[in-house]
Amino acid sequence: MGTASTPSGYRAFAGNKEMFGADPREALERLLVSLPQEAILPIVILPYNRGDAFFSEAQQTRLFELKSRRETLTTSEQREWEALVEASFEAATYRAQSLKTVKA
């Protein structure tokens, strides 16, 4: 799934910090180490670079394939890349709206 430049697994983020891990716990532990002790920020952990109901694995794969050749895309491929970027942003919005809020 992921490559060295596009990790897969889980992404944990809080504010402007983000860390990746093979599982949710690893991503969270890496994030906590990077945050200041007194930080009071919501932490979100999501699967990363995997297809889901909002953006398929085939779309994800094609997006990264086109991104890796961005400087040499044909006009048609450029339009496809732009459509995939837009679809990935829409998917992120729908994905976030579908999350349940957990309070500590």
Image (spheres, rainbow, N blue to C red):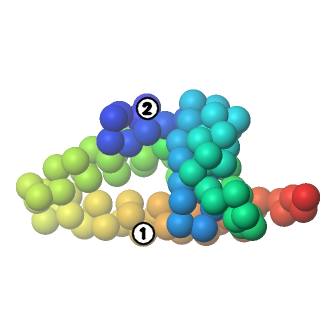
Residue under the image location 41 percent in, 35 percent down: 2
85 with respect to 65 (left or right)? right
**Is label 1 or label 2 in front?**
2
Q: Amino acid at mark 2?
A: Met
Q: Splitting the image into 4 quarters, where does residue 86 fall?
A: bottom left
In the image, which disc is placed on residue 6? none
Quadrant of the drawing holding the C terminus: bottom right
Residue 41, given in percent of the width and then of the height, sits at 72, 66
- Name the spot of residue 32 as percent of width and height, x first: 66, 48
- Residue 32 visible in this rendered orientation of the protein: yes
Residue 10 visible in image: no
| Precedes in sequence: disc 1 or disc 2 | 2
Give the amino acid at mark 1.
Glu
Tell me the residue at 53%/66% (across/down): 16
For residue 30, above or below residue 14: above
Q: Is residue 99 left or right of residue 53?
A: right
Query: Which of the numbered marks, if any, corresponds to residue 1?
Result: 2
Q: CA distance from mark 1 to mark 2?
A: 21 Å
How packed is label 2: few (under 14 Cα within 10 Å), some, or many (20 or more)? few
Q: Which mark is residue 86?
A: 1
Q: How would you rate the neighbour count of disc 1 (Cα within 10 Å): few for under 14, some for 14-19, many for 20 or more?
A: few
Element on which disc 2 rests: loop
* Quarter the N terminus occupies: top left
Residue sitting at x 26%, y 53%: 67
Residue 16 against residue 58 in the figure, above or below:
below
- Label 2 near label 1: C-beta < 8 Å? no
